[in-house]
Image: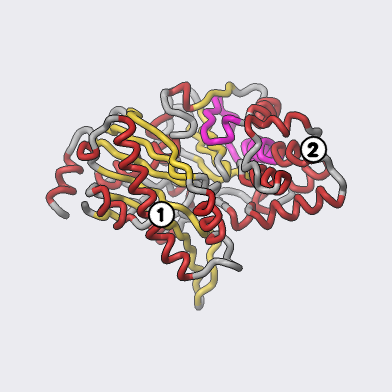
């Protein structure tokens, strides 16, 4: 271990930049966070949108039938530069000295996630791939960088997801209240924290689609002029097609018991295209299609709670881009009327910043030598320390 890494690990307070780009591939979320064993404090946050051309290239890399090896190689390094720029720009914009940052925790950009694995000889090998080369980030910023958090959990027999439950536990556990932290990003995932829970008591899994299907339908409807249903306005004008909704709710992933994780492989462009074609054949109004796929997200979350959680939570704490979709949140409240609905904003962490903050916390735990996966959530055989450390 280098002297600098020992110095960082020995600090009581570590200043970390968390970096995250989700399945929607909208851009880089960057959060400057001060982390200690007793407190997590968000100092600055911003999102740095990908240029439209870059976003199209990234989404192309997520499609096995069209992705090219030379492009994957190239954009791994391109995104390393983009992620490094996000750190530098955030520090400059917020007046935080770059040299005051001890550590960077980068999730990278997932382009393929295969939690079910594929056969190799007599074994099934699980795999995942996030790009955004951490060596480039460390070199450009001169800051020790931790990345590639998912593979170690997979090597231990897990699905490599969800990873944020460790951070949810640090941020939101309560002595008495039972809480569910519900992220609605491209994919939706829940962390269930029983009152007074220990790390082994956490239940967490992907509930199904979040914004991913809605966003795809909006792009189809508008010919790419719009990327999402702002505030759920179009969904609010539509009528849910209940038979169509019930049919989509039969998707095998939604009925599968946890631990489980998913992504574009199951709910990406191909899934959305099928829905769009079916809606066209049945001559559904655009607003009705959007209302129905918005209900798919809300209903699948509520159904996951009813099927797979040992009890209903006292509180649901929302985060992620879907938290801004008032129609979706309204549908979720209708599904779960007896549960108090909050957001991470109520705890001092922006709903948009929460994922980036989580990877800052994961990086802090890694440098401290703490086991930071949750085997009950991922299915791993044992707790492990996640991530690869690239010294500055």
Spot occupied by residue 260 in the image (x, y as percentages of width and height): 56, 51
The residue lying at 67 percent from left, 23 percent from top is 337
Q: Is residue 315 magenta?
A: yes
What is the quadrant of residue 239 in the picture? Answer: top right
Q: In the displayed structure, would residue 158 be above or below residue 19?
A: below
Q: Nearer the viewer, residue 185 or 82?
A: 82
Secondary structure category for the residue under label 1: helix
Instruction: Name the residue furthest right.
Output: 282
Which residue corresponds to mark 1? Answer: 79
The residue lying at 40 percent from left, 49 percent from top is 107
Q: Quadrant of the N terminus?
A: bottom left
Secondary structure category for the residue under label 2: helix
Q: Is residue 314 magenta?
A: yes
Spot occupied by residue 279 in the image (x, y as percentages of width and height): 81, 48
Spot occupied by residue 2 in the image (x, y as percentages of width and height): 15, 53
Provide the residue span drawn in magenta: 296-324
Instruction: Name the residue furthest left.
Output: 3
Q: Residues within 10 Å of mark 1 (few under 14, many from 20)?
A: many
Tell me the number on the disc at residue 277: none
Residue 306 shows in the view: no
Q: Nearer the viewer, residue 140 or 35?
A: 140
Which residue corresponds to mark 2? Answer: 288
């Amino acid at each position: 271990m280098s002297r600098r890494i020992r110095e960082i690990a020995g600090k009581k307070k570590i200043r970390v930049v968390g970096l995250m780009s989700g399945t929607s591939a909208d851009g880089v979320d960057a959060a400057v966070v001060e982390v200690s064993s007793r407190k997590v404090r968000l100092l600055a946050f911003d999102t740095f949108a990908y240029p439209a051309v870059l976003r199209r290239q990234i989404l192309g890399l997520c499609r096995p039938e069209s992705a090219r090896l030379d492009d994957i190689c190239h954009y791994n390094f391109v995104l390393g530069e983009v992620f490094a720029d996000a750190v530098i720009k955030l520090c400059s914009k917020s007046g935080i000295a770059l040299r005051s940052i001890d550590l960077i925790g980068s999730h990278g950009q997932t382009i393929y996630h295969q939690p079910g694995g594929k056969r190799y000889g007599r074994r099934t090998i699980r795999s995942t791939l996030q790009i955004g080369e951490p060596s480039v980030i460390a070199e450009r910023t001169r800051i020790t960088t931790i990345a590639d958090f998912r593979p170690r959990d997979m090597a231990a027999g897990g699905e490599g997801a969800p990873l944020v439950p460790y951070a949810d536990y640090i941020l939101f556990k309560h002595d008495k209240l039972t809480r569910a932290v519900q992220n609605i990003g491209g994919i939706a995932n829940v962390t269930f924290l029983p009152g007074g829970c220990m790390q082994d008591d956490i239940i967490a899994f992907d509930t199904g689609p979040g914004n991913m299907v809605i966003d795809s339908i909006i792009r189809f409807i508008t010919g790419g002029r719009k990327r999402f249903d702002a505030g759920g306005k179009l969904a609010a004008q539509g009528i849910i097609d209940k038979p169509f909704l019930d049919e989509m709710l039969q998707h095998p992933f939604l009925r599968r018991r946890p631990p489980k994780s998913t992504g574009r492989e199951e709910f990406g462009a191909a899934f959305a295209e099928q829905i769009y074609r079916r809606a066209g054949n049945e001559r559904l109004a655009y607003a009705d299609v959007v209302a129905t796929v918005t209900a798919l997200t809300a209903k699948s979350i509520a159904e996951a709670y009813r099927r797979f959680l040992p009890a209903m939570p006292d509180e649901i704490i929302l985060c992620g881009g879907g938290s801004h979709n008032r129609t979706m949140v309204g549908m979720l409240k209708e599904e779960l009327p007896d549960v108090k609905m909050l957001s991470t904003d109520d705890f001092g962490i922006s709903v948009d910043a929460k994922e980036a903050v989580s990877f800052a916390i994961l990086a802090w735990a890694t440098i401290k030598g703490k086991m930071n996966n949750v085997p009950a959530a991922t299915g791993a055989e044992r707790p492990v320390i996640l991530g690869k450390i690239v010294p500055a």
